[in-house]
């Protein structure tokens, strides 16, 4: 009977994702991983087989929390157009707020993919398909309800939006300029007859500022 693990796997994967996200897969060393996770190399490899195994698990958890959560949440919106706009709005907002300019861990991984690691290439490719399918579904629904013009093939529009996501994330690493990022998204949203940038809901003023008594 194997000994139970003496660490929180979720926290280890989160810590590993942070260092992989910041430095990239190739530049992250075993020492980096040991320092950020608190695990010895022996414990790390016993739990995750090797650096690649740890990376794949860390990337998987990142995608579950960052990408799939967003897609599920936005697909619940009654307006398919708002779901598409919301997707880009969150990406631009996160990109501009990230002071380290790390971009997206998935897109960064795509830039490091090599033909020698076909399994890794296949995994990253499947995640881009997930994004494309999200756009495809929202465009189909948007055309059905009349929010989005039906004069362009859905496949082409979904792939165009995917390409903008990838390009936006790369540019955010080297040119995190609000005008640039918003300008990249704007023409695509105009083609879909969707407003960009989205209108932000005004924040409610605090009671202290309005002079109301705080109970």
Image (cartoon, grey):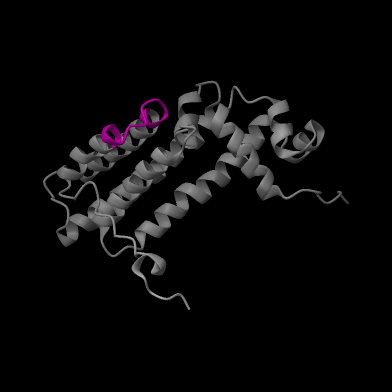
State whether residue 213 is above or below residue 96: below
Residue 17: x %, y % from top left: 59, 38
Residue 197: x %, y % from top left: 24, 46
Residue 206: x %, y % from top left: 39, 65
Residue range corresponding to the magenta coloring: 171-181
Where is residue 16, by image quadrant?
top right
How many discs mark residues in the rendered view?
0
As drawn, which residue projects farthest toward the bottom?
Answer: 215
Q: Nearer the viewer, residue 137 or 203?
A: 203
Residue at x-position 40% and y-position 53% = 71
Where is residue 162, by image quadrant?
top left
Task: Let me know if residue 179 is in the magenta part.
Answer: yes
Task: Let me know if residue 69 is in the magenta part.
Answer: no
Residue 119 in view of the camera: no
Q: Nearer the viewer, residue 107 or 172?
A: 172
Residue 110: x %, y % from top left: 46, 29
Report the side of 1 relative to 39 (left or right): right
Report the side of 174 relative to 64 (left or right): left
Residue at x-position 67% and y-position 30% = 51
Q: Nearer the viewer, residue 59 or 17?
A: 17
Residue at x-position 80% and y-position 37% = 43
As drawn, which residue projects farthest toward the front?
Answer: 211
């Amino acid at each position: 009977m194997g000994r139970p693990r003496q660490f929180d796997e979720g926290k280890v994967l989160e810590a590993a994702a942070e260092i992989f996200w910041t430095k990239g897969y190739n530049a992250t060393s075993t020492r980096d991983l040991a320092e950020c996770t608190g695990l010895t190399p022996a414990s790390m490899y016993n739990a995750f087989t090797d650096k690649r195994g740890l990376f794949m698990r860390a990337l998987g958890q990142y995608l579950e929390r960052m990408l799939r959560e967003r897609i599920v949440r936005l697909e619940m919106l009654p307006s398919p157009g708002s779901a598409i706009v919301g997707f880009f709005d969150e990406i631009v907002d996160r990109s501009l707020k990230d002071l380290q300019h790390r971009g997206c861990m998935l897109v960064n991984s795509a830039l490091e993919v090599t033909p020698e690691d076909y399994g890794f290439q296949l995994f990253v490719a499947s995640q881009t398909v997930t994004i494309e399918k999200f756009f495809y579904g929202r465009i189909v629904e948007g055309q059905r309800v009349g929010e989005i013009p039906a004069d362009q093939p859905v496949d082409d529009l979904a792939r165009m939006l995917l390409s903008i996501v990838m390009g936006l994330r790369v540019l955010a690493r080297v040119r995190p300029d609000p005008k640039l990022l918003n300008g990249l998204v704007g023409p695509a949203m105009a083609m879909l007859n969707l407003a960009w940038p989205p209108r932000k809901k005004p924040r409610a003023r605090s009671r202290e500022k309005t002079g109301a008594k705080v109970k």
